[in-house]
Amino acid sequence: MMGVRRSAPRRRARLPAVHSTGLLTDHYELTMLQAALRSGTAHRRSVFELFTRRLPAGRRYGVVAGTGRALDALDAFHFDDAQLSFLGGHSVVDGPTLEWLAAYTFTGHIWGYGEGDAYFPGSPLLVVESSFAEAVLLETMLLSIFNHDSAVAAAASRMTTVAEGRPCIEMGSRRTHEWGAVAAARAAYIAGFAASSNLQAGADYDVPTRGTSAHSFTLLHDTEHDAFAAQVESLGQGTTLLVDTYDIVEAVKSAVELAGPQLGAVRIDSGDLGLLAHQVRRQLDDLGATQTRVIVTGDLDEFSIAALAAAPVDGYGVGTSLVTGSGHPTSGFVYKLVARAESADPEGPLIAVAKRSVDKISVGGRKWALRRRTAAGVAEAEVIGIGAPPLDDGDDRNLLRQLVRDGETIGREPLDSARGRHDAAMAELPDESRKLSRGEPAIRTEYVGADRSASTSPFAS
């Protein structure tokens, strides 16, 4: 074939298989471990909590996401020969510490908020109880998962809320890290997105996947008409045709001529989306395609989706803003030691410990949490009990569920359970939570027990 030059096939680079998550951590976690082993404190019973001191500026609530991924990562958290060789070869830790790591397995307990639930400043999203040595090594891994996934879920929740039932599709894979894209698709689905463009998310988590064509497919053909004809012949009349490559009016006309009134949808990816949606809707109706949907994409966020509320739009495709947390790519979670045993005695009492640094305070003591609700089921406060669960008056909802018992994962659940939990959590929040304007958290946080019989959160929002 003239003009075609074949080259010798190249060997494809293979991504390294990840058999262990043990090195998904920071150097100083292991040096702390080494020092604690030397001092004899490594085996003291300890309680760590994962929480945030404040919500991102202007947000009324957060959304828990990442729990399922964290449990998978915990199951794979160990140190294989190659990792131990790396740590020893680079003098990260000494010989006794390497021996301890070689036998590492988590044997403690973990409680957590249900995935998909809402959270507020101070909410103990995870409570990890084990020896100091076992728990401290999990800090970085847990924070990286929850900070990313919850940021995406919070943005997704705001978007699906203002979409008011119109489906949203996650389309952000090309705007973030390749594996971050898979996690983002999962988190968005928990918070109400209908589907994702990411096939790996479909394979790994059964997230529904969607997609038809991009502008390059139209440009490949001699005419737009040819491109539409090829797509309809291949994918059927119910496909979605992208109509803004050249002239939208001509494109819509050509689309209906080819697919008829059974055309599934047209997609608009640029321009004044609200104005164009009205124009395209009128044209479709005039051509008899009254059931053909209008889908819009193109740098959407929760604010632009809200601005399109009055437009005849049937669905949204969201990319960059979603996978970057819509301006807040991290949730601000921290993982702090809040209680420890007085001695190495595993049956000894726990004492509360807390950080007192300016702007980085923590509240000591092992926590329990419930959401206080009115008789009508509307959330009023996040009530956090120190040392003992707060009292439930019958209308309230306990928030912590056990995820790991004696090192065994018991809290794994289908993704649809988290999705349903998010719907229920949003339904119980007051109307204030749905505002996009800057404001305080939708409900207050209260501490009860120990020396805090009834006090509000010390964390500024």
Image: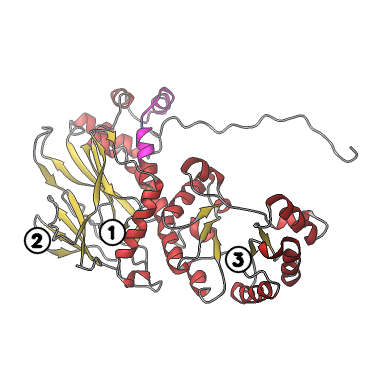
**Up-down: is 9 above or below 227?**
above
Labelled disc at residue 91: none
Q: CA distance from mark 1 to mark 3?
A: 43 Å
- Residue 380 is situated, as x and y percent measured from the top left of the image, at 22, 67
Q: CA distance from mark 2 to mark 1?
A: 20 Å
Confirm whether residue 332 shows in the render: no
Task: Please indicate whether residue 317 sits to the left or right of residue 46 in the image.
Answer: right
Quadrant assignment for the C terminus: bottom left
Q: Are marks 1 and 3 in contact (CB under 8 Å)?
A: no
The residue drawn where x is 9% and y is 54% is: 450
**Front-most of residues 254 and 163:** 254
**Up-down: is 454 above or below 32?**
below
Queried whether the magenta region covers residue 85, the answer comes back as yes
Instruction: Identify the element where label 2 is drawn.
Output: loop
**Up-down: is 163 above or below 234?**
below
Three-letter code, disc 1: Arg
Magenta-tinted stretch = 71-92
For label 2, the residue is 453
Three-letter code, disc 2: Ser
For label 1, the residue is 53
